[in-house]
Every structure is written in structure tokens, then in C-alpha cells.
Amino acid sequence: MVSKGRDKNVPEAMDHLAYAYATGKGVALDYQEALRFYRRAADKGLAAAQFDIGTMYEMVAAFPRTTRGLSLVPKGSAARVGAAEYKLGWFCLDGRGTKKDRAEALRWYAKQANMESLRGC
């Protein structure tokens, strides 16, 4: 099913396939393939894929730790992806790709918490 969506350039299908490659679930673990499919989904406007690209750049040792990953996470946040706001808070608190800033981290955590409460969680 995912391969049919991939063949038709369905962003959600490409995102699922990227996740499979990033985690090695059902396919061989392959970060380069994961990144390729995340980029294809992100190019189609899928905010979750933009967030996942940013996360890969920050978390996967195979990719250089630069501010590039951090620059992609806010795109997911702008689309109201709650995990992106949480991740931005964590990056600010830990100084990943940016300077450590506890106040900025708390601001992102509060935005994410507010979004979760709006969803009824």
C-alpha cells in the first residue's frame, strides 16, 4: 500500500516509507533513503516530513550536526505540529544547533502544551 502511494507521489506514503527506512521497520535501516523520502514528502508540503528532516540532522550521527536541522524544525511548528514545538524547546534547552536559552525553551514548551490542550489531550 505504501509503495502504491509512493509511486503516485502521495506525501503521507513517502513519509511512512521514510520512517520505515529511518527505523529499519520492514526494510533495511538506511538513513540516506529515509532522508530522500522525507525530502520528497516535504517538497510536497508535508510539515511532519519537514520536522523529521530536521530531527534526522540533529539526531543521526551519520549527518553533520549543524544548524540546518534546527532551521527545518520551525516549518513543522508553523504548521502546528506539536512535536516540532516540543523539539524546538528541547533544542533551545540543550543548545542543539542554537545557543542554550532556557526562556526560549519554556516558550516553545508552553506553545506545545497549549496546542495539546486544544486537541483535548
Image (cartoon, rainbow, N blue to C red):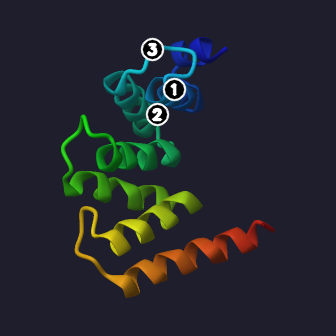
Query: In the image, residue 77 lies at what x, y percent?
Result: 48, 62
On screen, residue 48 above or below 27: below
Q: Does residue 61 appear to the left or right of 79 in the view shown?
A: left
110 and 75: which is toward the camera: 110
Residue at mark 1: 14
Q: Nearer the viewer, mark 3 or mark 1?
A: 3
Residue at mark 3: 28
Residue 71 visible in the picture? yes
Residue at mark 2: 41
> Which amino acid lies under the numbered mark 1 shown in the image of this protein?
Met
Q: Crowdedness of circle 1 by 10 Å Cα count: few (<14), some, many (20+)?
A: many
> Which amino acid lies under the numbered mark 3 shown in the image of this protein?
Ala
User: Regarding mark 3 in the picture, which secondary structure is present there?
Assistant: loop
> Do tag 1 and tag 2 residues touch (Cβ < 8 Å)?
yes
Q: For the C terminus, give its image quadrant.
A: bottom right
Residue at 19% over, 53% down: 66
Cα distance, mark 3 to mark 2?
20 Å
Query: In the image, residue 87 lies at what x, y percent?
Result: 45, 62
Res 36 quadrant in image? top left
Q: Crowdedness of circle 2 by 10 Å Cα count: few (<14), some, many (20+)?
A: many
Cα distance, mark 1 to mark 2?
6 Å
Residue at far right of view: 120
User: Regarding mark 1 in the picture, which secondary structure is present there?
Assistant: helix
